[in-house]
Amino acid sequence: MSDLATPYSLLGGEDRVRALVDRFYDLMEELPAAAAVRAMHPSDLAGSRNKLFLFLSGWLGGPGLYVQRYGHPRLRARHLPFPIDTAGSDAWMLCMRLALEEQVESPLREQLLQAFSRTASHMENSGTRQRVGLGIGRSASSARAVAVHDPDVE
Ligand code: HEM
């Protein structure tokens, strides 16, 4: 592995990032456990899919497509209109975890799981920040190596 390897290149580039986003949102449509999170989104998910793809491209160390188009992500601020509690964060992570399990090999899968989990927790803006439920740990040291860009959550 090159020192320059990024999660984006390890994943396989643009097509694989798009595939991950598409599966993630397909699962959000399908899973009853994600119904409340799905309901926060527009009825047509095409725009949401595209924005998440653009964001993840840069967040994973690939082309900074979201920043080029929309400027500074201010991800946490952009989520403030939506009340996101631990259950919402866990539901979002359930979809992402299943998509990662289907599409990404270890150890990248676990590294991305940790990185997404940290970012999803940071989006919580309602209710308690206590972690319960899915057992998505955030302390596994092996996952800290993942070099995702600062999620820029303020
Ligand atoms: C924690 C649970 C989360 C919930 C409930 C949630 C929900 C939402 C909703 C309802 C939108 C608006 C969709 C739209 O306007 O089309 C949105 C936008 C977005 N979300 Fe999340 N989200 C969560 C976590 C995350 C995480 C962890 C990431 C990144 C790793 C992320 C990245 C984005 C991006 C890039 C947008 C588009 C922002 C924009 O330009 O308007 N979200 N999210």
Image (cartoon, rainbow, N blue to C red):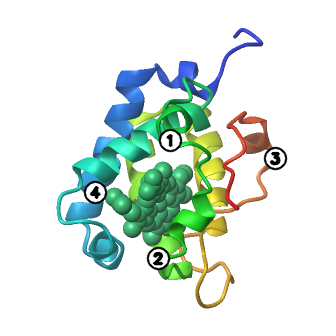
Of circles 1 and 2, the one toward us is 1
Using residue 23 as the reference point, say whether residue 143 is left or right of it: right
User: Secondary structure under badge 1?
Assistant: helix
Q: Amino acid at mark 4?
A: Leu
Q: Amino acid at mark 2?
A: Gly
Q: Which residue position holds label 3?
A: 141
Q: Amino acid at mark 1?
A: Phe
Q: Quadrant of the N terminus?
A: top right
In the image, what residue occupies the spot 25% across and 65% down? 42
Mark 4 or mark 1, which is nearer the start of the sequence? Answer: 4
C-alpha separation, residue under disc 2 versus residue under disc 4: 14 Å
Q: Are marks 1 and 4 in contact (CB under 8 Å)?
A: no
Mark 3 or mark 4, which is nearer the start of the sequence? Answer: 4
C-alpha separation, residue under disc 3 versus residue under disc 2: 25 Å
Of circles 4 and 3, the one toward us is 4
Q: Which residue position holds label 2?
A: 88
Mark 4 or mark 2, which is nearer the start of the sequence? Answer: 4
Instruction: Pick whichever, 30 or 153, lies toward us.
Output: 153
6 versus 21 height, above or below: above
In the image, what residue occupies the spot 25% across and 75% down? 32
Using residue 77 as the reference point, say whether residue 23 is left or right of it: left
Could you say where residue 38 lies in the image, as x and y percent from the top left?
Answer: 29, 70
Of circles 3 and 2, the one toward us is 2
In the image, what residue occupies the spot 20% across and 63% down? 30
User: Secondary structure under badge 2?
Assistant: helix
Mark 2 or mark 1, which is nearer the start of the sequence? Answer: 1
Q: Which mark is residue 154?
A: none
Q: Quadrant of the C terminus?
A: bottom right
Q: Which residue position holds label 1?
A: 55
